[in-house]
Image: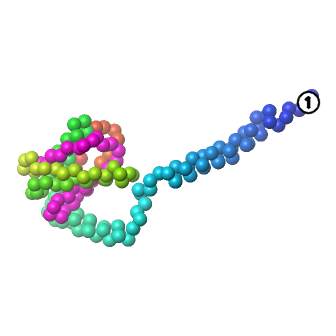
Amino acid sequence: MKPTPWYKQFWPWFVIAIPVSSMFVAVIQISYALNSPNDMVVDNYYKEGLGINTVLDKRNLAAELNIGASIVIDNTTGEVILTSQNAQEETLTLNFFNSAISDKDFTLTLNRIADNQYRGNLKKSISGIWNLYLESAVGWQIGARLNLTDSNYAQFKL
């Protein structure tokens, strides 16, 4: 009985496939790492660290003024309704920061429509995880985290 050559057997190809597939996956990961944005990395970490004190001052001012708000976001119509607690300004600024991609960040101006109620319109629907910061011209700021992965409608408190 003549033995079959090695290239016609299963096990040599199985053993060769393991390092070849590892190299293939490594090439894909390296190309993805080189071509994807690195928005999570901050270039000037010292300046960002100093800016934390300014943010803390704004949030402390909001706590002193007892500022609070609840927001309703309807992704279907693009309507954003904010009900405030102790906010007296004519306009408020609502900043949307995407948790992973900074190119998606945008700012929405909310105009007063009644006592303690503000309204704005989104230009496009949003989804995913967002950090929201409500600010006023007076200098206070409050924030919350929004997760719109499951629905087109969100109601939450800042």
Locate residue 36, reporting x and y percent. 47, 51
In which quadrant is the N terminus drawn? top right
**Is 119 covered by the magenta stretch?**
yes
Residue in the image at 55% along x and 50% along y = 31
Task: Tell me if I can see residue 155 in this picture.
Answer: no
Residue in the image at 70% along x and 41% along y = 17
Q: Which residue is mark 1?
A: 2
Question: In the image, which residues are magenta?
Answer: 117-143
- Label 1 is placed on what type of residue? Lys
Locate residue 39, reporting x and y percent. 41, 56
User: Quick one: which residue is furthest to the top in this view?
Assistant: 1
Residue in the image at 80% along x and 33% along y = 8
* Residue 16 sits in quarter: top right
Query: Which residue occupies the foreground of this view, 69 or 47?
Result: 47
Position of 39 compared to 51: left or right? right
Locate residue 138, reporting x and y percent. 14, 63
The colouring scheme, among rainbow, by chain, secondary structure or one colour, is rainbow
* Residue 67 sits in quarter: bottom left
